[in-house]
Amino acid sequence: MTNNLTKDQIEGLAEHLENAELKAFEVTKITDDYPDMTYKDAFDIQWEIRRRKEARGTKIVGMKMGLTSWAKMAQMGVEHPCYGFLADYFTVPDGGEVKFDELIHPKIEAEIAFVTKKPLKGPGVTIADALAATDFVLPAVEVIDSRYKDFKFDLKSVIADNSSSTRFITGGQMVRPEEIDMKNFGVVMEINGEVVATGAGAAVLGHPAASVAMLANMMGERGEEVPAGTFIMTGGITAAVQINKGDNFAVRYQGLGTITGRFV
């Protein structure tokens, strides 16, 4: 993988996109101005945003996979999933409040999260490897918020924008991976008491562990590994649903409890 952008351009775009996230303003997709940028450039921008946060003392507390459903990839016109990192200030307690004004146009997705007990390093990581390296799984709600105008982007632009990561809530019960049928595991999302989305685990690349394996393989392309003890959100089981200020949400996870929250 090669770069078409210079180090200065990568640093400048990282600052530009991180400012859009921190100050909650929309920007146009960066491939409009840099049509020749490569996937390596896009990931370099994301890793530079990560470096900037860590330099300010922000802790990276996990990883997320995005665009992990075939339907979502088709909807967004992208070819394969992407990953992003989760910063410490992204976390919101179960039953807690998400500050709407810190975000631009948030949507929520129901997900299942994995916590690893062994490192995973690609290439060649399989679903079986991912399951063997998993300590437990637990429910999660991801709030996504693209910094791009009208939530419109291509894959390179969204990778650079940390794959639309912004907030997440975990709760419910932790179970070992063998205690749950992850393909047929069902979730129901309600907003203000009304069912708005349902789904099953198979929506995530056929099996959520496939998402963990893909993360390890994608990070392996950069010589990075997924360390033991990593919290990984595997991607939306449901479609991403737009949410407004004042909305309450509840997501029910079959046999694993409910996560709730409110946008204020």
Image (cartoon, rainbow, N blue to C red):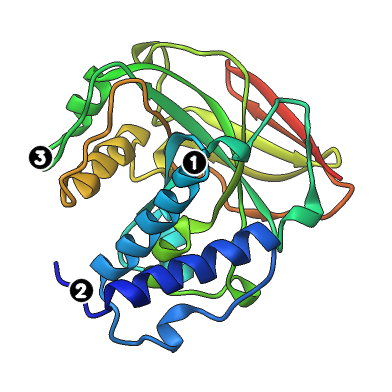
Q: Is residue 181 above or below residue 54?
A: above
Q: Is residue 129 above or below residue 191?
A: above
- The residue shown at (82%, 55%) is 244
Circle 3: residue type: Gly
Is the residue under label 1 in contact with that under label 2 (CB below 8 Å)?
A: no
Front one among 142 and 167: 167
Q: Which residue is mark 1?
A: 86
Q: Quadrant of residue 120?
A: top left
Front one among 225 and 256: 225
Q: Which residue is mark 2?
A: 3
Which x, y percent locates residue 165? Answer: 53, 51
Tell me the distance, in whole angstroms, between the alpha carbons under discs 2 and 1.
25 Å
Q: Which residue is mark 3?
A: 124
Is the residue under label 3 in contact with that under label 1 (CB below 8 Å)?
A: no
Horizontally, residue 30 falls left or right of residue 256, namely left
Circle 1: residue type: Leu
Q: Earlier in the sequence, mark 2 or mark 1?
A: 2
Q: Is residue 19 above or below residue 261?
A: below
State whether residue 21 appears in this view: yes
- The residue shown at (49%, 35%) is 59
Tell me the distance, in whole angstroms, between the alpha carbons under discs 1 and 3.
24 Å
Where disc 1 sits, the SS reads strand
Front one among 155 and 92: 92
Q: Earlier in the sequence, mark 3 or mark 2?
A: 2
Q: Earlier in the sequence, mark 1 or mark 3?
A: 1
